[in-house]
Image: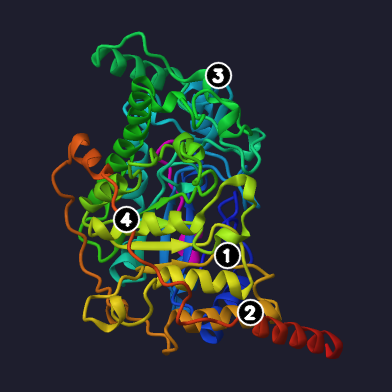
Amino acid sequence: MRKPLGVVTAENELEDAAGLRARLRRLRREAGVDGVMADVWWGIVEGAGPARYEWRAYRELFRVAQEEGLKVQAIMSFHACGGNVGDAVTIPLPRWVRDVGDADPDVYYTSPGGARNHEYLTIGVDDRPLFHGRTAIQLYADFMKSFRENMADFLDSGLIVDIEVGLGPAGELRYPSYPESQGWEFPGIGQFQCYDKYLEEDFRAAATEAGHPEWELPGDAAGEYNDTPEDTRFFAADGGTYLTEAGRFFLTWYSSKLLEHGDRVLDEANMAFLGCSLKLAAKVSGIHWWYRHPSHAAELAAGYYNVPGRDGYRPVARMLARHDGAVLNFTCAEMRDSEQPPEAMSSPERLVRQALSAAWREGVEAACENALSRYDRRGYNQMLLNARPNGVGPAGGGGGAPPRRVAAVTYLRLSDELLTATNFRAFKAFVRKMHADQDCCPDPARYGRPMRPLERSGPEVAIERLLDATAPEPPYPFDGETDMSVGGGLAELIDWVFDKVEWIFC
C-alpha cells in the first residue's frame, strides 16, 4: 500500500499523525495489509542546504508504521513531485539545487524546443561537480548513506524490507518524455529529452567516435508531445528514421545512457545499504500507448528501445541482476487492453507480460503496481492475474515447475476514497485473494521470499553484454483470468446494493 504523496509535508512535518495511525491500523487489522510504501523526498530532507539532512519527520512516520505492525518499502525519491498523473501535491527539488539550475538551466532535461524539465536532474550531469563541488551521482549517494546512518535502528529491526531507488521522473528509470506540465496529453508520443548541452555534447562525441560526426539528434523530425507516430518522419511505420542506421545509433545511445545511469546509482545504493537485510528495487514505467504501432514511439521517447525484433526491457533486468538481484518494479498492472481507446494502439496486458518475463528470464524478482487509482473488481482481478499469471499452484498446471509470481504488489494509494464502505469492502477482498485466501503472515520468508543481508554488486557488466539481452523471446504464457477472483459484475451489484442501504440508514 502506497501512502499519500504529501504524508510528510514540504515543511518536513508528519501531517495528521493521529489520522494516519488510524488509517494504517484499519489497513493492518481489517484488511490484512502487509506493509506500506513511502516516498522519502530529497527536496524535503536536504532542503535546508547541501548535506544538511533532517530525518525527524520520516523517523516519526516509520515509527507509526512499526507500531502498527506494518513493513516499510522506502523510495529514495530524487525527483520533484507535481506535474505527473496522480500528483496531488508539489514538492520541488531542494532550493539550493534549483539555485544551481537557475544559473545553469542545462542541469535539467531539455526538449527539442528548449523547454526545461525541473523534475529530475539530467543524466548528463551525473559526473559534473556542479553542485557545491559534488556531482549528481554523489548527491544521490550521500543522501542514501545519510538515510542508512539515521535509520539504522529501523533497518536493523527488519522494518524496512525494500529500498526502491529513484532513477528518474516519478522515480522511474526513464526520461521525462511526457510531462503534463508542458502540455502533454494521452496518448501523445512525447518527445526525446536529450537537448541539454551536456547530453548534446555526449552524443556528438559518441557519433564522432562511431565515425559519423555528421549525425545529429532527431530534432523536429520526431514531432511534438501530442503527435501520433504517423505525424512524424522519425516514427512513421513506413520508412521512419528510427529504422535507419543513424536512427538505430541514436536510439541505442539514448537507451544506453539510461541503463548506465541506473546501473551507477544502484551501485551506490548497494554500497550504502550493504549488509542490510533488504532488497533494492527500481521502478520501470508501463508506457503502454503505441505499443501496437511498429515504432513503439512513446516507449522510444521515454528511453525504452523496444521494437519488433528487439526487447527493450530485458537489458534493464540484466542490469538489475548484478546488484544482488535488485527487483524490477513495473507499473500499469491493473489495466486491460479492452479498456484502452483504439486510437492509442495500446496494449498494457502484452507490455506487462513482456516486462515481467524479461525479469524472470534474467533471474531477478519482479514486482508490480497499478498506475492509476482503481477501486473496481475488474482492476483488482487484473492485478491478481499479473501477480500470479499461472495461478497459486505450480506453473504449467501442477507439473512440478516452480510458480512464476511477483515478489510484491503495491496498491496506489491510501486515500479517504479507498476507505469508503464499498471501496474498502472490495479492497479487503483483493488483499485476501492476494494472500491466496490465507491469513496474513508478517514473515516474508514464509511467502517464499527469505530476507538476507544485501551482498556487494557483481562485477560491472559491459554495455555490449547488456545489449546482448535485446534478442527477443516470447513472453511466458499467462492465464486468461486469475484463479483468485474477487468477483465480477454480480459482486459489484451487491456492492452497489450495500452502498445504497448504508446511505439510507446512515
Residue hosting label 4: 474
Q: Is residue 115 above or below residue 381?
A: above
**Between 464 and 70, which is closer to the camera in this rendering?**
464
Numbered label attached to residue 424: 2
Disc 1 vs disc 3: Cβ atoms closer than 8 Å?
no
Disc 4 marks a residue whose amino acid type is Pro
Residue hosting label 1: 413
Decide which of tag 1 and tag 3 comes sooner along the chain: 3
Q: Quadrant of the C terminus?
A: bottom right
Q: Position of residue 85 (x, y in %)?
A: 62, 49
Residue in view at x 33 percent, y 36 percent: 137
**How far apart are the two marked residues, 3 and 4, measured between alpha carbons?**
35 Å
Within 10 angstroms of label 4, few (less than 14), some, or many (20 or more) residues?
Answer: few
Q: Nearer the viewer, mark 1 or mark 3?
A: 3
Decide which of tag 2 and tag 1 comes sooner along the chain: 1
Within 10 angstroms of label 2, few (less than 14), some, or many (20 or more) residues?
Answer: some
189 horizontally vs 254: left or right? right
Residue hosting label 3: 220
Q: Is residue 256 above or below residue 203?
A: below
Decide which of tag 4 and tag 1 comes sooner along the chain: 1
**Between 68 and 195, which is closer to the camera in this rendering?**
195
Q: Nearer the viewer, mark 3 or mark 4?
A: 4
Task: Give the color scheme: rainbow, by chain, secondary structure or one colour.
Answer: rainbow
Which segment is the magenta one? 50-61
Decide which of tag 2 and tag 3 comes sooner along the chain: 3
Q: Secondary structure at mark 4?
A: loop
Disc 3 marks a residue whose amino acid type is Asp
**How far apart are the two marked residues, 2 and 3, measured between alpha carbons?**
48 Å
**How far apart are the two marked residues, 2 and 1, measured between alpha carbons?**
12 Å
Within 10 angstroms of label 1, few (less than 14), some, or many (20 or more) residues?
Answer: many
Q: Secondary structure at mark 1?
A: loop
Disc 1 marks a residue whose amino acid type is Arg
